């Protein structure tokens, strides 16, 4: 079977205003099957967000090729939904209008069918009662859920999430992870999920890609053979610790210790 997403010997260097080359990725190859949930972990600055920009078509690699199905990615793609670390909601718009914003922006108008879709998504993220609230009336976790609903509005085949839960407290973060898995289960997507947290990566993903320090390449690709549905009990399994330990061996750095500590504390 043809993989859905492929990075084929991808290298990328940024060029600064002064013409200086900053290498970010070198010789990165991996593939993602349709509806697979792949997490990427690696130290700060190793090129994780660069992967995101290349897959979404916001940028072209300076070497190699990124392909979706059998087409090279050469321009920004409509079939990619992106969730960033901060939900970047428009503060003056209600929840419904924030969710609808990509359609409004793209087509300049909203149909009744669009409103029905938005209402369904808002129900899926459990915020129906807050549909008429503005972002500053919501908690951080609720705002991030709105960001997820907005990314799903155009029913993208691919969902890219760049540290989507890192601004949340440990408990909310963990609950959001399980909510995301529920959403993914109900409406399967091909997911590239970037995180600093080894535990979060193992808990959520089918496969974890471990990046080395920048200019980065893949240090390891690990299939996570843990039963689904995943739950807090998943973290008690011996295999869970084996996976996290194996990944930790590759990338243990102070940044990982910081972001992973809350989840580890919850395991204790
Ligand atoms: N626009 C840019 N211009 C120049 N260099 C850049 C640019 N964006 C990123 N870089 C450099 O590319 C490298 C990879 O950056 P990237 O943002 O992909 O890392 P990251 O793994 O997402 O880091 P973090 O975990 O801190 O978010 C870094 O050395 C960074 O300084
Ligand atoms: Mg980043």
Image (cartoon, rainbow, N blue to C red):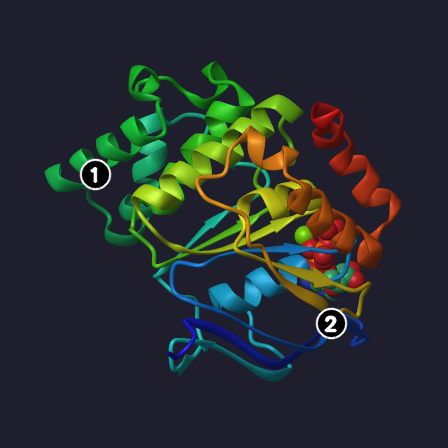
Is any atom of residue 89 visible in this view? no
Q: Which residue is mark 2?
A: 217
**Is ligand 1 closer than 8 angstroms to the Cβ of mark 2?**
no
Image quarter hosting the C terminus: top right
* Secondary element at image label 2: loop
Quadrant position of the N terminus in the picture: bottom left
Residue picked out by circle 1: 117
Ligand 1 is located in which of the four quadrants? bottom right
Q: Is residue 28 visible?
A: yes
Residue 43's tag is none
Q: Is residue 16 positioned above or below 191 on the image? A: below
Q: Residues within 10 Å of mark 2 (few under 14, many from 20)?
A: many
Q: Which quadrant would residue 140 be assigned to in this image?
A: top right
Q: Position of residue 258 (x, y in %)?
A: 81, 36
Say which residue appears at 37% left-offset and 17% top-offset.
133
Q: Residue at x 83, y 55 (%)?
A: 249
> Would you say 66 lies left or right of 188 here?
right
Residue 106: x and y in percent read: 29, 53
């Amino acid at each position: 079977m043809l993989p859905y997403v492929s990075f084929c010997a991808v290298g990328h260097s940024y060029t600064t205003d002064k013409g200086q080359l900053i290498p970010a990725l070198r010789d990165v190859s991996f593939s993602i099957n349709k509806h697979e949930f792949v997490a990427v972990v690696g130290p700060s600055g190793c090129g994780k967000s660069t992967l995101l920009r290349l897959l979404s078509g916001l940028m072209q690699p300076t070497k190699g090729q990124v392909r979706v199905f059998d087409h090279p990615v050469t321009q920004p793609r409509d079939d990619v939904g992106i969730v960033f670390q901060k939900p970047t909601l428009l503060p003056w718009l209600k929840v419904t209008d924030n969710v609808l914003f990509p359609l409004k922006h793209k087509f300049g108008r909203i149909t009744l069918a669009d409103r029905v879709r938005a209402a369904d998504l808002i129900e899926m993220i459990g915020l129906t009662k807050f549909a008429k609230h503005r972002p500053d009336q919501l908690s951080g976790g609720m705002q991030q859920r709105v960001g997820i609903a907005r990314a799903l509005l155009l029913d993208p085949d691919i969902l890219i999430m760049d540290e989507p839960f890192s601004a949340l407290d440990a408990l909310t973060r963990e609950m959001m992870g399980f909510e995301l898995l529920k959403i993914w289960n109900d409406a399967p997507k091909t997911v590239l999920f970037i995180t600093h947290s080894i535990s979060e990566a193992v808990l959520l993903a089918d496969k974890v890609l471990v990046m080395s320090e920048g200019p980065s390449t893949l240090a390891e690709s690990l299939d996570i053979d843990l039963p689904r549905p995943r739950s807090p009990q998943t973290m008690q399994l011996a295999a869970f610790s084996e996976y996290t330990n194996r990944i930790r061996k590759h990338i243990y750095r102070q940044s990982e210790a910081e972001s992973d500590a809350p989840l580890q504390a919850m395991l204790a």
